[in-house]
Amino acid sequence: MKALPTLFENNKKWASEIWESNPEFFSRLVAQQAPEYLWIGCSDSRVPANEIVGLLPGELFVHRNVGNLVIHTDMNCLSVLQYAVDMLMIKHVIVCGHYGCGGIKAAMEDQPHGLVDNWLRNIRDIHHRHQEKLEILSEPERLRKLCELNAIEQVINVGNTTIIQDAWGRGQRIAIHGWIYDIADGLLRDLNVCITSRRELDTLQKKI
Ligand code: CO
């Protein structure tokens, strides 16, 4: 079976365009990667991390999963975070949620979706914790608000990992940002929950 020829053609075109404009591009990347940012975003195909923020290969370290969740027992996410903080010495962690998130929508529904419901349970817990401010909203507004609250909760989860706690403890400067992306207009919005220390984390946790 011929394996997806279009994608290989696209790849050749992409690589040759880069070769033409910058012949040293790939050899520089082979030598090292030194991204300043870790992006934790949703797997949604409409939210491509590098494109949204206009960064090239080598500039953004990326972890994506359904609903951009940071769970304290998820060795995959924690390993990415640890590598980014301890080895790459990134300066910023960006948790980016997005409006219209299918994972969040599914978490708000009552019907079953199979295995993924175990993962979405984390979002249902957030929904439950913020019940009072969510139930007064219309359904579309509630979905938008939960997308925002989920991103903020994940900023808190990042801050509470042993990885970030240890890094802050030894004086490493790392800022954790909460953003939301709108697939309807292609624009990012800052949720204004940036934290750079244990004290700021505590304040955010009390505020939300
Ligand atoms: Co999503």
Image: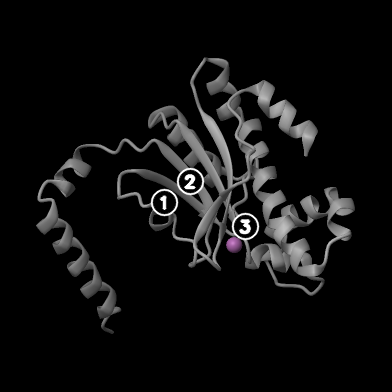
Residue 107 relative to residue 168: left or right:
right
Callout 3: CB less than 8 Å from ligand 1: yes
Label 2 secondary element: strand
Which amino acid type is shown beneath numbered disc 3? Gly
Looking at the rendered structure, the kind of residue marked 1 is Val
Q: Residue at x 74, y 27 (%)?
A: 203
Q: Residue at x 56, y 29 (%)?
A: 163
x%, y% of residue 94? 52, 42
The residue drawn where x is 69% and y is 62% is: 104
Report the Cα–Cα distance between label 2 and label 3.
13 Å
The 10 Å Cα crowd at callout 2, few under 14, some 14 to 19, many 20 or more, is many
State the image coordinates of residue 179 (x, y, percent, origin top left).
58, 47
Label whose residue precedes the other's in the sequence (1 or 3)? 1
Q: CA distance from mark 2 to mark 1?
A: 10 Å
Q: Is mark 1 within 8 Å of ligand 1?
A: no
In the image, 5 versus 205, the foreground residue is 205
The residue under label 2 is 39
